[in-house]
Amino acid sequence: MVINEIAGSVGVVTGGASGIGLATAERLAREGMQLLVADIDGDAAQTAATRLADLGVRTQAMAVDVSDLAQVQAMADQAFADFGRVDFVFNNAGVYVSGPIAEMTHDDWRWTIDVDLWGPIHGVEVFLPYLIEQGTGGHITNTSSFAGLAPNVELGAYCVAKYGVVALSEVLHREVRQHNIGVSVLCPMRLATDIDSSGRNRTEEYGGKPEELAIEIDEEEMAGRLLGPDVAAEAVLFGIQTNTLYLHTHIESRRFVQRRFERIDKSFDGAPGL
Ligand code: NAD
């Protein structure tokens, strides 16, 4: 194990005020992890941190926009000032815009990539040197998606960002083993959270909140069951305990991943020059 004792260790969770981040923070608090709950919605982060403190662990809250490197740096400084160490980093905050690639605006692309891909990159960029310097191991979990493992039609920008998060995690997993730092990438299918109203967090810099805050979902069109975020929380805990790289929430996603690799494998047959 790369975190020898979860009880008493210190974790930082981005997007910790809602959905997967909140469910995971709660699961880890039950294991005795102390937590900095960070979220672009500072009030909601404070509410979450107060609730988690009722479970008997020390918590802090902070308003952080993960797309901004300076704010992620300030979050790390705050975590070390408050707790004196960090053992677990959960780069989880994320948003999405749906629609065909032909209809994505430049702001749609920038917002999705800045939050969903630059967010985890910033988290790694800032915390990795601290974890290495600390010299006591640790664990980094990045939230990608099933959309980071297989193409999802009408989620092009999101897929681009989430494939990137898988690549970041895969390479990091190999590179930091020598420092006794574990890495996981969470790849959920559909979980019942507030993700369909991601637009609530879209700042003016990216065109502001859309008129319709919640994206309409056609249940018949969607692959996979709609499960609760506690499934992801359990997977994240398992990842920390076992240093498992890929974390899944739905058995349904397996066939899609297999098919993608079968298509890639087949493309070698008859390829010119091979
Ligand atoms: P959610 O909307 O319930 O929670 C996301 C949290 O991130 C919110 O509290 C929000 O305020 C925060 N956030 C948004 N932008 C931020 C920013 N720039 N900086 C900091 N915080 C920010 O949604 P969720 O489903 O819990 O999403 C968590 C992660 O899980 C995301 O990365 C999402 O892409 C991923 N995911 C979700 C699902 C799903 O079906 N719910 C499936 C696959 C992947």
Image: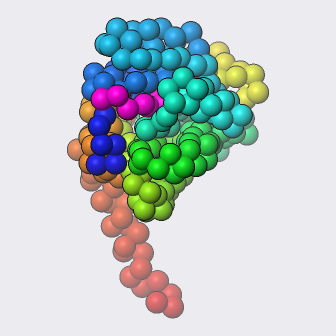
The residue at 66%/29% (across/down) is: 74
The x and y percentages for residue 175 are 48, 62
The x and y percentages for residue 60 are 50, 17
Give the side of residue 89 with respect to residue 2, left or right. Answer: right
Q: Is 12 covered by the magenta stretch?
A: yes
Quadrant of the image occupied by residue 239: top left
Q: Closer to the camera, 223 or 89?
A: 89
The x and y percentages for residue 78 are 60, 26
In this picture the colour scheme is rainbow
The residue at 70%/22% (across/down) is: 203
Q: Closer to the camera, 21 or 229?
A: 21
The residue at 66%/18% (across/down) is: 209
Question: Height in image: 40 above or below 53?
Answer: below
Q: Is 15 covered by the magenta stretch?
A: no
Quadrant of the image occupied by residue 194: top left
Does any portion of residue 28 appear in the rendered image?
no
Q: Closer to the camera, 259 or 129?
A: 129
The residue at 58%/26% (across/down) is: 81
The x and y percentages for residue 185 are 40, 46
Give the side of residue 85 with respect to residue 252, left or right. Answer: right
Q: The magenta stretch spans which residues?
A: 7-13
Question: Height in image: 100 above or below 257?
Answer: above
Q: Residue extending furthest bottom?
A: 273
Q: Residue extending furthest right?
A: 205
